[in-house]
Every structure is written in structure tokens, then in C-alpha cells.
Image (tube, rainbow, N blue to C red):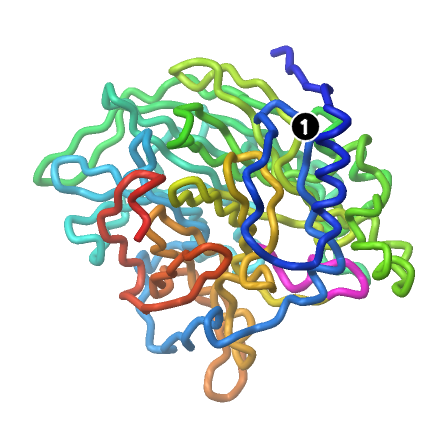
Amino acid sequence: MKMKTHKKVGKLVLCAAILASSLTSISVAASSNWSIEDDYTSAWSRQQAEKVALTEETTAPIIDMDFEDVAPDVWVWDTWPLQNRDGSLANVKGYRIAFALVAPRTYTWHDRHTEARIGMFYSKNGKDWTYAGIPYDYDNALGHMQWAGSAMLDEKGKVHFFYTATTDMNANGGKEFNKDGWVQRAEQRLAKTTFDISADKNGVHLTNEGDHQILLEADGHHYETIEQFQEHGNIITGFRDPFFFQDPNTGEEYIIWEGQAGTNRNDLKPENIGDKEYRDTHTVPDHAKFYNGNIGIAKVLDNDVTKLEILPPLLESVGVNHQLERPHVVVKDDTYYLLTISHEFTFAPGLSGPDGLYGFVGEGSLRTDYKPVNGTGLVVANPAEKPFQAYSWWAAPDGQVISFINEPLDENGQVQFGGTFAPTLKVSFDGDTTKIVKEMQAGEIKPFGPYGRSLR
């Protein structure tokens, strides 16, 4: 498939964008004039990232160590619900459906990634979940592993099943540890298949599995290829986590994903560092430029979501953070919240931040001048005393935030492996601020409406 990139840049718009990116005040930006095709990418700067800190409003409650495994025979981690095309929670004859990465517990906690598949769960009440196994034929799937994605139920009752097709890490140089952490070499591509869906007294069934196809590959210009990654050998490569999104203000549809900067952003720009005063008084470690995470976007060109037009990234964290995982969007009227998860170990040298859900807010359109929410960028983070208790937070349009129990510490300070649903949190979104307002049951997903004006 031939992929297009747009290079038009209005000089006046670009100058205004660079000026805006250097400002340190954190507020909802004025409406931008950028169209989705414009070559403007917001920057999460080192100056902004220095403000990352836990607050009472963003720190999740401590998870009770007496948790139950939702599926005792498999590890369960990154989780997402089946949504309708407009973003609302799908309901199939009274059932709610969720998908999650799974691997047999015969594999170690750390090796689970190398044999990851996507499992299906269903529930009548959104609290008591039944594990229904892996819904696709592994021999038909693309990649040695299938990593996280999203799922959409269209108006004809067809499930569009988006995932990351990932090659065998051992076939691509294996994995190893070095001074920077885990080095992971596994080519990743965005893929999909389709299913028919039905439900009866025996549960939910996905049938008539369609062909598996590659939707997108890294282009090398906006998005780093694995060959480019291997030239500098940073800690982890990424072109993954396809998220289907229908913009409620335009009706246009997109796939959003985690990527890393390609050749057009292979060095630090002023906006990646901060304003002039900050640049004049701060030294950036040399290796920081290799921490080059971004949030990619492609426009959907057909109703079947098989034809995409690759576009410049929405946000980049060059010099700040190497990994902006599982990006997704929450919309309230004309305000856009671009959300992503990241790890403590993926922050660039000279910066630090907790494992958490990070958010950026902008006004007027999906391509806008995003600024970190709350003055820190944090939306949800683990408490300091249990810094890795949960991970992979995903926010629904109404602010429900699901995640999985990761590596909580027991009463003796020993790491315990979770691999099951964590308590759901409810987060309020109000202008440039967010706040955790409620803790719900483990894995709970209440019905929620579409993107846009449903968020209260």
C-alpha cells in the first residue's frame, strides 16, 4: 500500500506553533488553525517534563493484595473494551465485551510478552467477567505475538479487531539487559481482522474470522523503522497499539498509535527542550536525543477501515521519553485530551517520572497545541510506596479508567506478580485539570456513551 505524507506547512502557522510550544504556562490552548493533514506536531518538552510529580489528585489508591485472578490459568494485562463506532460501549444482547493480552501462566511473568495473544472476556454486569479464550486462529494471525490494539463494532454488526503484529524477538536479535534497561528488538506493524459476533445463554461468540492484513508500517520519515532503531540501539522500539477513533466534532475517523521519531526529527529542536531562558541555563545529556517517542496518526479513508493515509505525529517526546504507549483520546465538547501511558525507566537522562497515565490537552481540533494537564502531565500514577502496582491505564469517554495489576509490593516489601484486572478508577476532566474522584471494583466497566458531549 502506498502511503502519503503531507508536507505543506504555512509559515505563519509554523511560527505561531513554535512560539506556543515554548510557553511554560499550562492552560487549554486557544483554537488552532491546523487541519489534521498539516505538518505540525506538538512537543512535550524537557522544561514541561521537569514538573512531573505525584499529587493527591493524581495518585491512585493502594491496591488490596487480596486480589482475585480473573482468569487463573493465564496472565492478563493490557485491556480494552469493545466499542461502537462512535466510541460508546458496545452491548451485544446484554453483554459487555473486553479484550486483553494473555499468556499461559506456565511462562514466567517476564517471558509472557514473548508469547502474548489477545483473549476475550464477557460480562452481563460489567463486574463478573468470563474468560472466553483467544477468539482467533493463531495460525492465521500475523506476527509471532499479537500485542495490544482496540476493537470496534460497526453499524452492520461486524467486529473490527485491531492489533499489533509483532515478530519473534529471538529472531530479531533477542532481548538483553544493558545499562539503560531492557533492549527489545521486535518489528511491529499495525494489523486487523474482522469477526461476526453473536450472543446467547452460553455467552458471546466471535465467528467468520476474516483475513488478517497489515494496515500500516513505519515509514522511516515520521516514524522510526526497526532498522533505524538498531542504528542507535536504544532501550525499546515501538510502532504499536492501534486505537480506532471517530472524532465527534468532524465525523472523521483515525487510527492512533505509539511510534518513535523518524529521520525528520532525528535531533533535538528548541521546542523539545524549552523556552530560551531554560535552554540557556540547562544542559541536555547527549544520549537524551535517542529518547524519541511520538504519537502517530493515520486518517481512515474507507468504511471498512482498510485504507489509511499516514500523517505527521500528533505529539512527540524527543529528548523527554522514549515510550508513549497505548495512546487514546477523550473529548469534551471542543476540548481534546490526548492520553498515553509511560514507564519510569523510559524517561530520558536527566528527567524522571512515575509509571502512569499522562495527558495533554488542546482546544479546537485533534491536531492542536497540546499542553500537559495539571501542570505536570500526570492523570493517574501509582503511589510512591507501591510504584509499580498497576499499569496500562485506558480512559473511556466518561472518565472510567481501567488497568491491570502489575507488580505490587506485599507487606514484606516483596514483589508479587498480578496479571489480572485492577480496580477501575473514575477520573474527572475539567479544562486543563483532571482528578481521581472514585475507585470502583476490579475490572468494572459501566456503560458509557460516545465521545464528545457525553463526558460529565
> Is residue 181 positioned above or below 307 on the image?
below
Residue 184 visible in image: no
Residue 431 place in picture, x, y as percent: 46, 55
Q: Quadrant of the N terminus?
A: top right
Residue 294 place in picture, x, y as percent: 66, 42
Seen from the viewer's position, the closer of residues 102 and 24 is 24
- In reply to whether residue 427 is colored magenta, the answer given is no
> Is residue 165 positioned above or below 9 on the image?
below
Residue 72 place in picture, x, y as percent: 33, 60
Q: In the figure, is residue 202 to the left or right of 128? A: left
Residue positioned 53% across, 49% down in the render: 361
Q: In the figure, is residue 17 to the left or right of 36? A: right
> For residue 260, what is the image quadrant?
top right
Residue positioned 42% across, 66% down in the render: 435
Q: Which residues are magenta?
A: 340-351
Residue 91 visible in image: yes
Q: Which residue type carries mark 1?
A: Ala
Seen from the viewer's position, the closer of residues 128 and 106 is 128
> For residue 278, what is the image quadrant?
bottom right
Q: Residues within 10 Å of mark 1 (few under 14, many from 20)?
A: many
Secondary structure, mark 1, is loop
> Is residue 308 positioned above or below 255 on the image?
above
Dot 1 corresponds to which residue?
218
